[in-house]
Amino acid sequence: MSDLLLRQRAHARPAEAPAEPAVLVPPRAAHAVRRAGRLAVAVGLRSVAVVAFLLLWEVAPRIGLVDPVFLPPLSEVLATTRDLAASGQLGEHVRASLVRAGSGFGIAVVAAIPLGLLIGWYRTVSTVLSPILEAFRNTAALALLPVFVLVLGIGETSKIALVAFASFFPILLNTISGVRTVDPLLVRSARSLGLSPLRLFQKVILPSAVPTIFTGLRMAGAASVLVLVAAEMIGAQAGLGYLINAAQLNFQIPEMYAGILTISVIGIVVNYVLLAAERRFSRWRA
Amino acid sequence: MSQPKLRLREVRKEFAHRGDTFVALADATLDVRPGELLAVVGPSGCGKSTLLDLLGGLTTPSSGEILLDGRPVTGPGLDRGIVFQQYALLPWRTAQGNVELGLEAKGLPRAERRETARRFLDLVGLGGFADRYPHELSGGMKQRVAIARSLAFEPDVLLMDEPFAALDAQTRESLQDELLRIWRATGATIVFITHGIDEAVYLGQRVAVMTSRPGRIKAVVDVDLDVSAPDVRSTDAFGAYRHRIWSLLQDEVVRAQQHELAPREDLAHV
């Protein structure tokens, strides 16, 4: 999380748009063909490393580069994943994990965005709350897991609370930065129209902060899956973290990898969904 | 003469800066007549922007008063519209949405907002670009949108802060003509702040010349030109006005440069 502030800076909008972009319509057909070509090359290039990795995973155990007991070939892991899915076990674990991650994430969103707006906008609120938030932010979420378990028990509450805690800060910090990096000229211009502070907030500050807030949501999405799996490894009867840990303890190695693969896919999907939402809400960005 | 639309009476604006007081504007006195296009020209850093903030109600004078139709200006309001040099369009709104902003502030119902915004986009020649986002528009088009936005809520006075300074020469000239056309079509009272002498002479019925810091109104020059004549900028009459204002400004420019070279203790004017 240490490079968070840097990333936020990079996210700030350039103050000046290019002076006179030509508003011309390019010849559509030729353009489309060239675009398709470029897209194919891009997709190809982007897939190379992933395909190579998957191939290595398949081949290495088979030719004895690694012990197939500890790292079964990809095809075997996929077969186990399919069996787990067919038996409904995998679905149950996924559901348990997603409900926890979703609840924690939801709580974080509901708490962090309004608080971030307040801190970003009101200097005094910021002065009062920043030190304590800074202290919490720099406390690794997992370090607090024992505390959460101690206070909230080993059930769902402690896991959801931990996810909420871990998701809270990326959203909060990005919301603050989103509010603070609003173009002052836009504020001046809106003020000159005599907009009330509330309308100013609604019509200028909030829409302007949305893209930055989404960056926070994306980071929080990743964080929520991360800490949830760790929490489920420590005490749970269901969930992907539990599946991975239990499989390892029972020496069901393909099942363990099936769990890991599922987590990874979920992480990618979550990121993609949030990215798509971010694009959808930031279309006005050049 | 009828009552002035906008009247500045010995307006003074001071800023505190690191314990010092820095005078941006000193006893500026000026009357703006109803329906006139008054250009204000001055050397850089003469307090033009401060003047505009005061007129817009974004800041309040340290002393003196500003009267709009005889009533003191106490804050921002829809009786004045500001056009900024950097357009200040909301990037997440289309041209139409941007023009509607002021109408929302005015509390107009949706259908009426849409219709009014359309009308004013047509007025500035952007009827076909209502659905474009600012990043899809050229600088000149953005400034047209900004002008439409400020005209749409029908302010008593339009305040323009070097609105064409960021544009290339050709776009600037065409927008100047456009502004004159709009001004005649709407009968708006316009205060046009610029640092360009040619622009001031071309646009202004009168040109107010400011001194370098602390800003004062040094002189007000009546400009009687038929700007519809072809290439009026090359005529002798234009040249004469130009020279007169240039002479008035010359001393101030020299003084302003001395200011610039002096140790920077005056950053507060921004």
Image (tube, grey):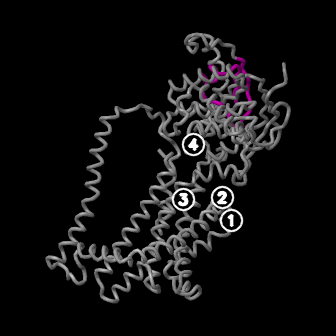
- The N terminus of chain B sits in image quarter: top right
The chain ID associated with circle 2 is A
Look at label 2 and name its amino acid. Answer: Trp
- Depth order, front residue of B13/A100: A100
Mark 3 and mark 4 in contact? Answer it, CB < 8 Å: no
Query: Residue at label 2?
Result: A121
* Magenta region: B193-222
Q: Quadrant of residue B218?
A: top right
Residue position for label 1 = A125
- In this orientation, which residue lies closer to the viewer: A14 or A165? A165
Nearest to the eye among marks 1 and 3: give it: 3
- Does the stretch in magenta take in B203? yes
The local crowd at label 4, few if under 14, some if 14 to 19, many if 20 or more residues have their Cα within 10 Å, is some
Query: In the picture provided, is A79 more to the left or to the right than A114?
Result: left
Marks 1 and 2 in Cβ contact (< 8 Å)? yes
Front in this rendered view, residue B53 or B246: B53
